[in-house]
Image: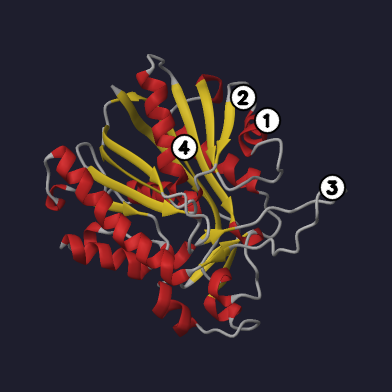
Amino acid sequence: MSFKITGTGRAVPANSVTNHQLSEFLDTSDEWIVTRTGIQSRYICSTETLTELAVSAAEKAMKKAGVQISNIDMIICATLGGDYVFPSLACCVAGQLGANCPSVDLNAACTGFLYALNFADMYYNSGKTGNLLIICAERMSTRVDWRDRNTCVLFGDAAGACALSKGSSLKYLRLGVTGDTTQLNLPSTSGNCPFSPTRDESNYAFMDGQAVFKFATRTLENEARQAFKALGISPEDIDLYLIHQANKRILEYVRLKLEQPPEKFPMNLHRYGNVSAATIPILLDELLEEGRISAGSKLFLSAFGAGLTYGSCVLEWE
């Protein structure tokens, strides 16, 4: 026995920014962005805090699960960072929700949701029971250089959450990391310590787009084939592929390699852009609302991110 997901939720800022709006101050166009990424718009925080988005998504997930915050035994936030360096986003969320359970952040970049599921699996397999709350929340608009069309057009702000309890949905889970920090990174601030030199570095996200594309396509296909081999199943046995929503061309590449129909590879990146760890739980929430997931549905989840992290899992919905 491991876990099952009992409720999901999502939250986005009020401000949806289109490609046309970006072209007003960037050397870009709707055609340029859509052709290369499939993204048409993204949500950007204006007055909202990341804590507010995280709390909203969490409350929706708990409501659907029929669980109160007093019954939550742990809060795990997958994020690149909250409104503060410290306290953690998870502690901020706990304060807003009125929780006093253990609350902690983890940072596996865009693979954060899968890493959080791994922590949940270990929690339940240790013999503990109860309810966990996983929140994936990102404010990517503060991480990119809005003068750089190669990065700022890709990302958005949002939060997705899942409530978990003990169950047997998880059939397979695998995580990994290459340790390559050069292809995708965001340097920390150097501060003004008088005992060490101040680094003259940009504090914006950097991405080697071509290298990341090659890594993503190769890794996602390999992760799928590893999972199917371990479980003794074929690509046709999976009902839906929930893949990290980073780039339409990456998703299409993997779909064609696995020879699966488009309807098995749902996408929402055209409306959200890349919201890092939050992409898969948001997509999961939408698919449940649309009635496309029901008891017995077999789901393949996979993601990649800075680190370079990667991971995959297979769930059979309960």
Q: Is residue 237 left or right of residue 181?
A: left
Query: Residue 290 appears at what percent x and percent y?
Result: 32, 51
Q: Quadrant of the N terminus?
A: top left
Query: Residue 134 appears at what percent x and percent y?
Result: 48, 35
Query: Residue 215 appears at what percent x and percent y?
Result: 37, 61
Q: Secondary structure at mark 2?
A: loop
- Say which amino acid is labelled 1: Gly
From the viewer's side, name the closer residue of 261 and 116.
Answer: 116
CB of mark 2 within 8 Å of CB of mark 1?
yes
Residue located beneath label 4 in the image? 61
Q: Quadrant of the C terminus?
A: top left
Precedes in sequence: disc 1 or disc 4: 4
Q: Nearer the viewer, mark 1 or mark 3?
A: 3
Cα separation, mark 1 vs mark 3, equals 32 Å
- Say which amino acid is labelled 3: Cys
User: Within 10 angstroms of label 3, few (less than 14), some, or many (20 or more) residues?
Assistant: few
User: Within 10 angstroms of label 2, few (less than 14), some, or many (20 or more) residues?
Assistant: many
Identified at 58% across, 23% down, the residue is 102
User: Within 10 angstroms of label 4, few (less than 14), some, or many (20 or more) residues?
Assistant: many
CB of mark 1 within 8 Å of CB of mark 3?
no
Q: Nearer the viewer, mark 3 or mark 4?
A: 3
Q: Secondary structure at mark 4?
A: helix
Cα separation, mark 2 vs mark 1, equals 6 Å
Cα separation, mark 3 vs mark 4, equals 43 Å
